[in-house]
Image (cartoon, coloured by chain):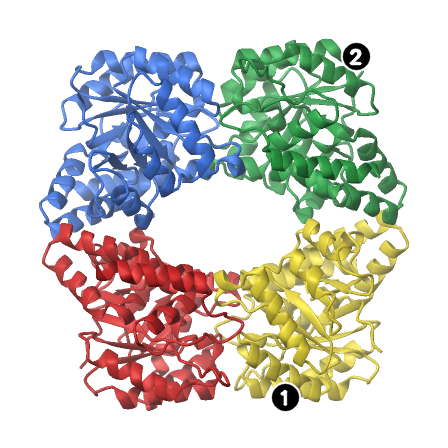
Chain colours: A yellow, B red, C blue, D green
Amino acid sequence: MYRFDGVFTPITTPFRASDGAFDDEAMRANVARWMATPLTGLVVLGSNGEAPQLDEDEADCVVSTVRACMPQDRPMLVGTGRESKRATIAATRRAAAAGADAVLVRTPSFFKAQMTGDVLERHYREVADAAPVPVLLYNVTMFTGVSLPADAVARLAEHPNIVGMKESGSDLAHMAECVTRTPDDFIVLAGSATTYFHALCAGCDGGVLALASLFPEVCVRLRALVKAGSIDEARQLQRRFTPIARSIGGTYGVAGLKAALDLTGFAGGPPRPPLRPATSTVVDVIRRQLEDLNT
Amino acid sequence: MYRFDGVFTPITTPFRASDGAFDDEAMRANVARWMATPLTGLVVLGSNGEAPQLDEDEADCVVSTVRACMPQDRPMLVGTGRESKRATIAATRRAAAAGADAVLVRTPSFFKAQMTGDVLERHYREVADAAPVPVLLYNVTMFTGVSLPADAVARLAEHPNIVGMKESGSDLAHMAECVTRTPDDFIVLAGSATTYFHALCAGCDGGVLALASLFPEVCVRLRALVKAGSIDEARQLQRRFTPIARSIGGTYGVAGLKAALDLTGFAGGPPRPPLRPATSTVVDVIRRQLEDLNT
Amino acid sequence: MYRFDGVFTPITTPFRASDGAFDDEAMRANVARWMATPLTGLVVLGSNGEAPQLDEDEADCVVSTVRACMPQDRPMLVGTGRESKRATIAATRRAAAAGADAVLVRTPSFFKAQMTGDVLERHYREVADAAPVPVLLYNVTMFTGVSLPADAVARLAEHPNIVGMKESGSDLAHMAECVTRTPDDFIVLAGSATTYFHALCAGCDGGVLALASLFPEVCVRLRALVKAGSIDEARQLQRRFTPIARSIGGTYGVAGLKAALDLTGFAGGPPRPPLRPATSTVVDVIRRQLEDLNT
Amino acid sequence: MYRFDGVFTPITTPFRASDGAFDDEAMRANVARWMATPLTGLVVLGSNGEAPQLDEDEADCVVSTVRACMPQDRPMLVGTGRESKRATIAATRRAAAAGADAVLVRTPSFFKAQMTGDVLERHYREVADAAPVPVLLYNVTMFTGVSLPADAVARLAEHPNIVGMKESGSDLAHMAECVTRTPDDFIVLAGSATTYFHALCAGCDGGVLALASLFPEVCVRLRALVKAGSIDEARQLQRRFTPIARSIGGTYGVAGLKAALDLTGFAGGPPRPPLRPATSTVVDVIRRQLEDLNT
């Protein structure tokens, strides 16, 4: 059985410049390169994968394409959260059939005021009951405007098919509560690379980090340093990578991450409109940040 | 050519209690009843229509079903906003083919930080260029966390295929700016029934109001009163209907509106999970509010 | 007995450029000029009076200075809200002794999370019990981060010594609730000039407006137009003055209002540090806005 | 010369139940007891000291009373932030004359929108220029609604008379930036006990913690554990004290801290109105939390 602790990266979805369609060749090249790193596994169709911008057919195609390039023993997590329970379960079943080892289910977000702790808890239970593979909760308030309370996390952690969560926020008190109020084998993964070190100190088991698409070894090493109690060295490492971590996925969004991929030999390419590619000014900022790290 | 000023209601999408599928019979019965009222027209697949919870196939089916029950001279507006430009355009074309007189395009919302005025402006231009029918902008910050600035509205109002907007917020200074900075034939429709009277005073041309599903005559009369300068009477009328306006669509969300429909002989039914039906306590509150209005 | 409906302006406190002390001569000149306008009365030591920046001694001196220049039949309202009940009552008594016709008591604001409706209600009751002159509630969330709920307003309106409120927010639904849930002789004054017209439509009895320091006749006329049901003309008038209304007190704060006073022959002068005077760019913007109004 | 790293507690100001005046005897008893602990020093007239609720005369009296009970080699920090620069400097001079070793200057907060990074930077420079003792910046957004940006902190840290800061927020990324962008001898103190462990991991030099009024040894030990790299043990200790840390100063405000002091043999007493004493339910919660820690 898989354990899902470790370092994952939420991979982007490359689109062809010509017609904006999913570029499966580019995806295969990227995945092959990530498979040569110490990354634990990949997250497909997360926010950085522009999941909300894909049709269901495209989404299925992305999942199959990635699975075909990943060895069976490297876990593939697939984002299958949708606004309705029925669509979430349907996407989960298709992902499982296509080889997902687990699914990452973001909170529904459109009807924010209605997404109380109770409603979210029931939603996750019903999805987990129906899911053929393990479920990880996914709280990403910066995109959803919805918060999954620690109380709900604590109760959901008792469900046999809910094995962990990704928390993308940077409220460390909340993250620490998620860690301390769930069993030891419930995996809490940090989603924000700018607070990755802090999340590891708080007891997180690893991360799902855009930064790990570019610097997988650094992200793996940071985790090892904290586990070994080398706090000062870990803090220094975090500090060095915080500026680029802030640029990709954060300040400049998916476009920033894709620009950084282009600059490092991956297939980044443009995001899907209305998202715009990084401006040349932004590309210059990111280039400089990458150069600073190589000196 | 249609003008889109007047009073619309954003109709709910009924689901069968048995299997949760779209209940087209119930929809037909509801539409028939609304067609016997002075409502200008209907908005299909808005937020109250639970659009984000429907598959694309279901959405198309809802549109065709409604159109078939509406006389050709009653305008049907269809919500076709999606997260990507390509999906928005595709949905717009399908809606137009199925008989939409115009489309209502909400701002994309997932990648909030990237949805700047410039990005939204370009998005709407490109959608309007490709749309076979007129486009209405749709700003609904309470659900999207995104704001369409008045500057962008003013510029977009010059596009020949962008004919109006629905503003669901209750910031009257913003609404007044949208009215005063756009040409007279650009339609500004209020989306919040609790501030409907105020929006009309501010110069709005009408509304897209959940309240109008229950009280179409009242909503039409309130508009006429303000046009006639009968401010005191209009204010009294608004005051009387504010409590129920707050309950349906607002405090209790779609579930509140559906409960009120059930209580007044329409087919309301349950919302789609994870949304929950109104609790019996909520139903009692709404029943009392309705009774108060009949005495 | 005074009635406090009508149009007030919250006067600024001029400081000497040389040493930053209260400039009583400048104040006298300003007040004399306002007394020659149709303003109902003046508000001394409001937010625009930089009340939080004054020592208690200075505050008392400002009050006496203004009273000495005002005829007895023109009401002077004095801001006496402090963080503690005892300081609020002490300031209220001193203001009354110095000739205040009523006091305007802002909500305490530092311990925001503790300022629940219940706590605020008890605070206002105890202050009103001890006040030798009538009390007006003062809700100014943009500065305090605290909101006085309409429920509390409705209950406080029954206190014999609480005669009205100033609501500085622009949430018209809230304002309408304050109007409709209080007796007819409870005065609700609008504090935001950018939504003054809308507030009057909503039933407000008048305003406490920075704009009225510069354009008292306009503010008085707008009120009369709405009372007479001339909505279109009133809306046009509001529209013309909205840009300058936004600049003074709003976007550019007290410094913007003081710059506008300097440009119109009043004694504006610098605000007290850390507040900075308007930059020359801002002064130019305001000058242009004022010129636009004269053409 | 003093160094201000270490563990401080922001002491409450006791009031007499009879007349609400400052209770200097109770203060002396409390201070004597704190002096028998390993606390580095005390913070007088912070938020927990109800500084905004005190008259200037009372404030001076509190400072003198505390100083008289503290040995000269134990640092006393005094909160002297006011809304105006002149009042802040005046309070700073009086505090220095009364024996403050340094002052803690909160950001002005009433005119929030005007408190930009530039304005705050100039304010702190001018205060520090005039201050006879070292200045610590004090950022407490939960009360002020104002944020001191890390950029401003970095520049202010170069001022010879600005020696450190207290950051009361729990945004660890921000805190880490304050640590890494300031010289090693610039002291960064954590103000939130619920994230104290995380702040220490992030490189903070200590804390100003309400929790330390009750558990000074625990707060000192937690700091030592992190310094020694005993992360797991430190995390356990934080976890144990997080519930009570959340109650006092946080959820239940000053009233909660005062109730906890009463329960542990200190003189807590009522806060000053409009603040209310802890209800009996809250007292019971706190009593249970304290008992849990003793078993």
For the point 41% across and 71% down, the residue is B122
Q: Which residue is mark 1?
A: A61
| Figure check: C161 above or below A194 | above
In front: B262, or B134?
A: B262
User: A92 or A119, which lies in front?
Assistant: A119
> Dividing the image into 4 quarters, which one contains the C terminus of chain D?
top right
> Is residue B204 left or right of D196 when viewed as pictured?
left
The residue where tag 2 is placed is: D71
Q: Using the rendered view, name the quadrant where residue A159 is placed.
A: bottom right
- Element on which disc 1 rests: helix
Q: Position of residue B37 (x, y in %)?
A: 19, 76
Q: Position of residue B61 (x, y in %)?
A: 40, 89
Q: Secondary structure at mark 2?
A: loop
Q: Tag count in the figure?
A: 2
| Residue type at numbered disc 1 | Cys
Quarter of the figure with residue A138 = bottom right
Horizontal side of C152 relative to A237 (left or right) equals left
**What chain letter is assigned to the residue under label 1?**
A
Chain for disc number 2: D
Residue lying at 67% horizontally and 68% vertically, measured from the top left: A137
Q: Residue C225: give x, y in percent of width and height.
A: 11, 44
How far apart in space, not on screen, are marks 2 and 1 (Cα)? Answer: 73 Å
Q: Is residue D194 above or below residue B278?
A: above
Disc 1: CA contacts within 10 A as few (<14), some (14-19) or many (>=20): some
